[in-house]
Image: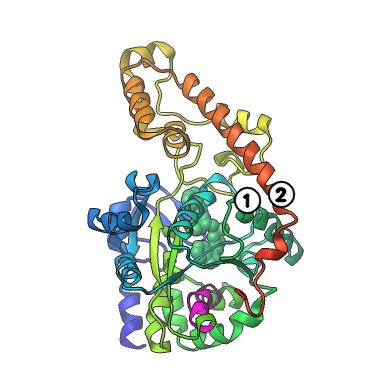
Amino acid sequence: MNARDEEIEESSFNETGNLRGDYNVTPWQVDGVVDYNKIVQDFGTRLITPEIIEKLRMFTGQIHPLLSRGFFFSHRDFDIVLDAYKNGENFYLYTGRGPSGHVHMGHLMPWFFTKHLQDTFRSRLLFQITDDEKFLYSQHLSLQDVEKYAYDNILDVIAMGFDPKLTRIIIDTKNIKALYPLYLEISKRLTFSTAKAVFGYRPSSNIGMISFPAIQAAPCFLPSLIEQKPTRVLIPAAIDQDPYWRITRDVAEKMGYYKPAQVHSKFVPSLEMNGKMSSSKPTSAIFTTDDPETIESKISGAYTGGQPSVGLQRMLGGDPDACPVFWYLSHFFDDGKVSFERSLKCRTGNLLCGECKSDLTIQTKLFISEFTRRRDQARNQIARFLYEDNPFD
Ligand code: TYM
């Protein structure tokens, strides 16, 4: 075992690769109530400070609500990427999706921020679809299933409005030729003990899963090959993906590349009591493919921060901080002023949960109906976005 392996062995992860403590966050599972201040310490990332937000504001003019509301909260080297850009060095964006089912509103959040960064910096974006990961990880998905979801999810990616000239979608099983040499270089430098310490593999883990992280790492270095010079990469994603970047950063400089930088988001909460919005629990999530009746019934059954009866709500008020319905309204639809007034009325018993649920239902139906229109239009644009040999020519 080398020194670096020992360092990771001694990390904050227990023997199954999960964080020690009251919650678990891995790329494949998030359980419990996540303590975001603690996760920064446990993962060894850094909080996004007002100084970094100010640096970004020099380019964007205003602060994106996902930053001002603290939804994007942590980073690695975001400041370095911004300083380099100021000195004339462009960077690529890189993000992705594992096609295990339909896309839900939680997945859209990192993509909204990615689009904001693309619009601001006119950055090229690589978007990876890890159909291989979902096939290897799932007990029930066949290769045909993940292929079907890959093309279904690509409609969502295009519906986000990414610039077709600046965006290329890599489907792992289709574009493996572009990834494979990098995969080899990366996997040769990663030991099983490091991968086990970071991802918690067990003797029963299939060997495809064990080497998969090198495939998700590969697009971090692809821009350097495309540009034929070391090129910086910034990855917007929720914090669950960070273990991949930890191992990638370990090998980057040894391979002659920059360490990839990240901005990490929190998780969009479940519509139910605890946890994150998750594809594996359909009632916890609003999918972009949900019809109006399904949206209505999911929101009407959602957990809230309200009291058990109207009388108690009027008397004691509710707790918007513990309410996923309030969370959705404040992060997706209400502006700062409306959100503040809503929270005040809730706390003082002047607003009932039914009223917030009704507002959320109306807004979500409108949003999804517009998104569906864009998804339909995306069907004949797919070819423009797919990765090819000379991707940006
Ligand atoms: P996947 O498909 O699990 O998730 C896609 C993106 O959505 C984020 N995410 C969430 N964000 C907020 N709230 C939630 N409840 C929530 N659930 C998921 C994820 O962090 C991710 O950004 N292995 C990856 C695919 C991938 C990738 C990447 C992701 C390949 N390369 C580069 C990010 C960056 C996966 O299965 O993501």
Disc 2: residue Cβ within 8 A of ligand 1's nearest atom? no
The amino acid type of the residue labelled 2 equals Gln
Residue 159: mark in rendering: 1
Would residue 287 be found to the left or right of residue 304 on screen? right
Q: Quadrant of residue 164?
A: bottom right
Provide residue 171's location: percent of width, then percent of height. 65, 69
Q: Residue at x 45, y 85 (%)?
A: 229
- Residue that protrudes farthest toward the left in the picture: 51
Q: Is residue 329 above or below residue 268?
A: above
Q: Quadrant of the C terminus?
A: bottom right
Q: Spatial distance from mark 2 to mark 1, Cα to Cα?
A: 8 Å
Q: Residue at x 66, y 33 (%)?
A: 294
Q: Is residue 16 above or below residue 107?
A: below
Would residue 6 be found to the left or right of residue 236 on screen? left
Q: Is residue 386 above or below residue 4?
A: above
- Callout 1: few (<14), some (14-19), or many (20+) C-alpha neighbours within 10 Å? many
Q: Does residue 141 show up?
A: no
User: Residue tagged by mark 2?
Assistant: 377
State the SS at label 2.
Answer: helix
Taking depth in this image into account, of 259 and 50 the one nearest to the observer is 50
Magenta span: predominant SS is helix
| Extent of the magenta region | 214-225
Q: Quadrant of residue 310?
A: top left
The amino acid type of the residue labelled 1 equals Ala
